[in-house]
Image (spheres, rainbow, N blue to C red):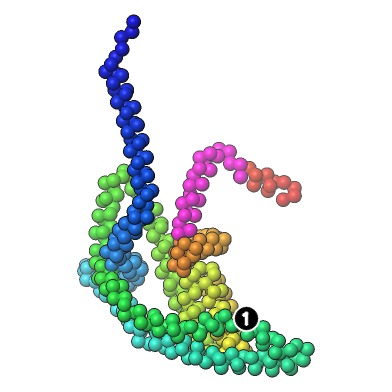
Amino acid sequence: MRKIDFKKLDKTYLKISLYIFAVAAAVILFEKIIGHLPGLSNVFHKTLNAILRLGSPFFIGYIIAYVMNPFMKFFEQILVKLFPKTQKHRKLLRTGCILVNYVIIIGGICWISIYLIPELKDSVLSFVSQLSTYSDQLNTTITNFFDRIGFINGDDVTNIINKVLAPILGIFQNVPQLISNIASNLYSVGKITVDIIMGIFISFYMLYDKENFKKHGCRIVYALTNRRKAAQMFDNAQRINLIFQNFIVGKAVDSLIIGIIAFIGFSLLNAPFPLILSLIIGVSNMLPYFGPFIGAIPAALITFLVNPITALWVILFILALQQFDGNFLGPKILGNSLDISPIWIILAVVLGGAFMGPLGMFIGVPIMATCKMFLSEYINRKYQAKYAEDDPLALKNEAHESSPEA
């Protein structure tokens, strides 16, 4: 008769009991979590909001420093070329370049606050207050034009245009109330103002001491990973930074230039409200691919309401400006920083807009470019590893080139 090992049997039972207890505890815990899911969701959202609220000055400071860094490097290079001795005083040189950036930014903000915003507000209110006059003038012009043709009833055309423009005019008529609401709410955003001011000071120290921040970050990465993975991470981070920095800074400079050219062009064409029209064109140009078309529609519509003949010249000018931007200015400034086809840009704009609105439409393009870069490299590595000696695509291409039909 075989002797039973009670010690081994006890260990087996103990293990089974522990498994049963763990499963039961997991089921009870899961049931409790499901029952208190709304409460846990509220706690999670409150915790996340608190973290974002406390960290917002640092986040804002990082964004300011990230945008200012290329301009600071640009000024440093210029000063070193003009005054080679400044290399011996790197801290003083760095401080001076940061202050130049701040003077330009603060001066731009002051100019916008003192001149641009009041002028823009007056233009919008003037346009909205005269909407009924512009509508009556447009109806009279259209009726007279088609009455001269004879075989088309001008009143019918006027009724159709009025039905099309009615919802758009209704939106414009609500603009004064919207402006007053925005103006009244500006006084209740003191927290944002404080965060921005703190972010400016934080960005100064981030830019001033960026080499030390980079050094500490590299030390952490090297401590947590091996040398090969750390080098790969740094290389990938550098490439991602180049994509985002070239796109964001380049697109901002490109849109600023396009906005200035649009203002000059609209002024020469005697277009109504050139400041509003150029601002629409410049801001909408920040959105890739769809931006120029989105900006052209309200600009042409506003001009059409005031003067239909001028609207035709405005449309032609906008088309010429878009061609200039797409074929000359944009490639000169942005270069080949994205290297993605229009279909990927359209997909990035659509997905980014669906998830994050206008901001997503803007940053979706460099995100898509980054994902496409890594995905292409991964596919290429897999393909080359699988077909190192026998490339089917190369064979197909050679066969196609050697065929009589080719």
Residue 26 image position (x, y, % from top left): 35, 39
Q: Is residue 346 in view from this perspective?
A: yes
Would you say residue 207 is visible in this rendering?
A: no
Where in the figure is residue 148, as x and y percent of width and height?
74, 94
Count of marks, rendered view: 1
Secondary structure at badge 1 equals helix
Give me the residue at 51% from left, 83% from top.
Answer: 172
Q: Residue at x 33, y 83 (%)?
A: 110
The residue segment tinted magenta is 367-393
Q: Looking at this view, is 225 or 141 the one in front?
A: 141
Residue 101 is drawn in which quadrant? bottom left
Image point (36%, 35%), residue name: 23
Residue farthest along the top direction in this orientation: 1
Task: Check the picture and name the quadrant holding the N terminus.
Answer: top left
In the picture as drawn, the residue positioned furthest to the right comes out as 151
Is residue 370 covered in magenta? Answer: yes
Please tell me which residue lies in front, 190 or 318.
Answer: 190
Q: Residue 103: name its quadrant.
A: bottom left
The local crowd at label 1, few if under 14, some if 14 to 19, many if 20 or more residues have their Cα within 10 Å, is few
Residue flagged by tag 1: what amino acid is it?
Answer: Val
Above or below, 296 against 202 in this view is: below
Residue drawn at x 67%, y 87% is 158
Query: Which residue is labeled 1 in the image?
Result: 164
In x, y percent, where is residue 180? 40, 84
Q: Report the side of 187 relative to 393 (left or right).
A: left
Q: Residue 230: where, in percent of width, then height?
A: 33, 48
- Vertically, is 2 above or below 336? above
Q: Is residue 161 left or right of residue 238?
A: right
Residue 366 painted magenta: no
Q: What secondary structure do most residues of the magenta stretch adopt?
A: helix
Q: Nearer the viewer, residue 147 or 295?
A: 147
